[in-house]
Image: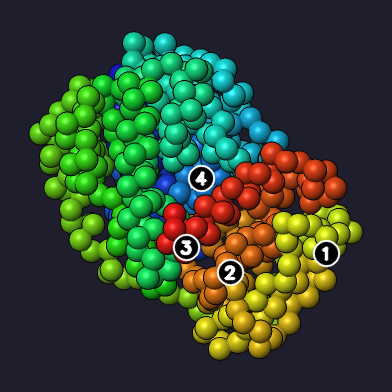
Amino acid sequence: MEIEFVNHASVLVRHGDVGLLSDPWYEGPAFHKGWRLLVETQPEQVADILSRTTHIWLSHEHPDHFSVSFFKRFGQMIRDQGITLLFQDIDDQRVADFLRGEGFQITFLPFETAVSLGDDVSVTCIKDEFIDSALSIRAGQTHILNLNDCNVGTRARAEEIAAVTGTCDILLTQFSYAAWKGGRENRDWRVTAAAEKLDNIRVQAEVFQPSMVIPFASFVSFAHMRNSYLNDAANTPRAVVDAFANADFATQVMAPGDVTNGTYDPTASTAAIAWWDAPYGSLEDGLMTYDSVSPQALQQAFGIWRERVFKNNARATMWIAQKLSPIRVLQPVVIALDDLDQSWRIDPVAGSFTQTQDAADLTMHSESLAFLFTNSFGFDTLSVNGTFEEARTGGFSRAARSIAIENLNNLGIRFDMGLLFNPKIIGVILTRLRGVSAKIKGNG
């Protein structure tokens, strides 16, 4: 068994004739010009990796794990070599529809069920929260657990997974935060978020008992003029190794092309830490920007958004919720577009988008708002790339309870009377919003 690190959340696990590649994102920005890889993988390197690949596993739909451009660019090679794609067996078919449309072979992985890939290699997919998944890989006598950026931060959650997978020999896990963490002045939240990621690794290691932890899935930067400040407290590989210097497990940092058979190699790890120092030292180079979108184009984009929302949700129920719900959902939201020096009021129930002088909830660029309107995953992207600011206290929470309605739709949840009486879904949403609000205020 060998694990070769490729980039970010992508590793190639090889055993016998099986080559299992995970989450290939190797070039270009992600999350609407918000993220960039610390280093990119050259096409000839990708071709070499694919020549040794029999299966590609995609953990979830986020673009740093499911890269459309990768499958467009290397699709013919994947088809010619008969590489099989592996994806979680879920009702949402957006990813599957794209892959089928490209002519790829797909195996859908049922949750918590071992699937043989041949040559003494089997995988078990574990569902995590709404869209993510983890993969337990048994290659010969070695058990590898790939958590990528699954939210496994409590002992109870780790034990739920361990009840399915058991302990592991090697753990691959995210090591730094990967979403908006307050405005420029709220560095305390980012420091806390970075510390929480290290605490997550501690909890995971206590439960899964790996002999080796490979930190990965965080080799990116916030790479836009509007969000690069979010890098100011991010964990680095060096910080991870320092945090676990006296741990019961070995921390193996890997650079692109490094290979491990599961035996700790301190020399290689030290060299990889030094290798990563260079890209971490140039995070402010070549930051991306946006181009202004006219009010007329924004109106057209809003029309597209409104059509999707009314198609996928019961408008009468939306009206009842806006007027009567104690949770205060679907209220009008005001967005200040600082590049246009204008503020716009979005009323999702009335289906209106009008200019206003009212106090804003969020401040952003017009291209960000156009992207939100044009794409069903727009608000999710905005919350990850962090190219906005909260304009007043509670602004993000109000926006999330209103114009993020398509986040629910993308999970197969229709806004109708059934949702209003689903305490589990409502509880999860409210708990997250309360946590975010507390940290924005500096109390979290």
Between the C-alphas of marks 1 and 2, the distance is 19 Å
Q: In which quarter of the image is the N terminus?
A: top left
Look at mark 3 in the image and give the residue it sits on: 440
Of labels 3 and 1, earlier in sequence is 1
Q: For marks 4 and 2, give the one nearer the viewer.
A: 2
Name the side, left or right, on which 326 lies relative to 131. Answer: right
The percent position of residue 168, horizontal first and vertical second, equals 36, 19
Name the side, left or right, on which 217 lies relative to 274. Answer: right
Of labels 1 and 4, earlier in sequence is 4
Look at mark 2 in the image and give the residue it sits on: 395
Between the C-alphas of marks 1 and 4, the distance is 39 Å
Of labels 3 and 4, earlier in sequence is 4
The local crowd at label 3, few if under 14, some if 14 to 19, many if 20 or more residues have their Cα within 10 Å, is many
Given contact means CB atoms under 8 Å apart, are the residues at marks 4 and 2 in contact?
no
The residue closer to the viewer here, 116 or 149, is 149
Amino acid at circle 2: Gly
Of labels 1 and 2, earlier in sequence is 1
